[in-house]
Amino acid sequence: MKYTFTATNLAKLSEEYSENQNFVLNTLPRLKILHAIKKDLNTITNLEWNIEYSPVNMNMNRVTIHYKNQTYKDFNFFYEIPLSLNFELRVYLSNSSIHFIDLYNFLLEKEILAKDQFSIKAAYHTIPHFIINKKTKRYDISIINKYSYTNEFNKNLIDENVKNDIQSGFEIFNPVFDQIIEQFKI
């Protein structure tokens, strides 16, 4: 299921999956950290945050952050943070492999990005995407533990390393998205 990333929806998810140990001990603390970061980064505009959660397919559980351009809506640029033990920030340029390749070649040709600036992941069943977190590979376990033992959704315990990687990603890629939109406006 897809939910808008709000404290109200976090409370609903927490109640609905309170018997699910994986959700309570792994997913929910990470969602609380990301919610605190979302609130802290609220001055960055044009972002729509969502949670996608399924107790059945845990590999698809994630937070998506869609970049919204009000004047030109044909592109689907988004960030993804899988709700797994390790932290990873992914950037998608489109919903298809072909569009990713075309846009990536454009970014290289215009020297907007360097060839090896970010690692690219792709697989048979996965749309190509950038992995852009360079410094942070794990969540701060002390913050995870603090969030594990509280029912509060509005604590402002922020994993600064995760926040810095997310903010850096926004600062790099939001202007890139704008450049792509400007180039391909019809």
Image: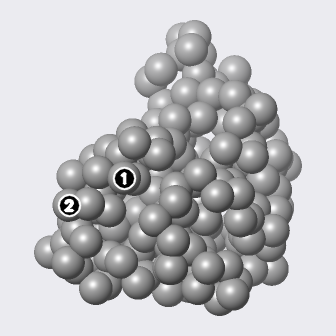
Q: Choose top left, top right, bottom left or bottom right for residue 182.
A: top right
Residue 163 percent coordinates (x, y): 75, 62
Residue 152 percent coordinates (x, y): 52, 60
Q: Choose top left, top right, bottom left or bottom right for residue 117.
A: bottom right
At label 2, counting other C-alpha atoms closer than 10 Å, the crowd grade (few under 14, some 14-19, many 20 or more) is few
> Helix, strand, or loop for circle 2?
helix
Q: Residue furthest left?
A: 56
Residue positioned 74% across, 43% down in the render: 41
Residue positioned 55% across, 27% down in the render: 68
CA gap between label 1 and label 2 equals: 9 Å
Residue at mark 2: 16
Front residue (pair 59, 21): 21
| Kind of residue at badge 2 | Glu
Residue positioned 56% across, 74% down in the render: 147
At label 1, counting other C-alpha atoms closer than 10 Å, the crowd grade (few under 14, some 14-19, many 20 or more) is some
Residue at mark 1: 11
Task: Residue 80: tell me if it is visible.
Answer: no
**In the rendered view, does 169 fall on the left or right side of 17?**
right
Residue 81 percent coordinates (x, y): 52, 64
| Kind of residue at badge 1 | Ala
The C terminus sits in image quarter: top right
> Helix, strand, or loop for circle 1?
helix
Task: Mark 1 or mark 2: name the one nearer the start of the chain.
Answer: 1
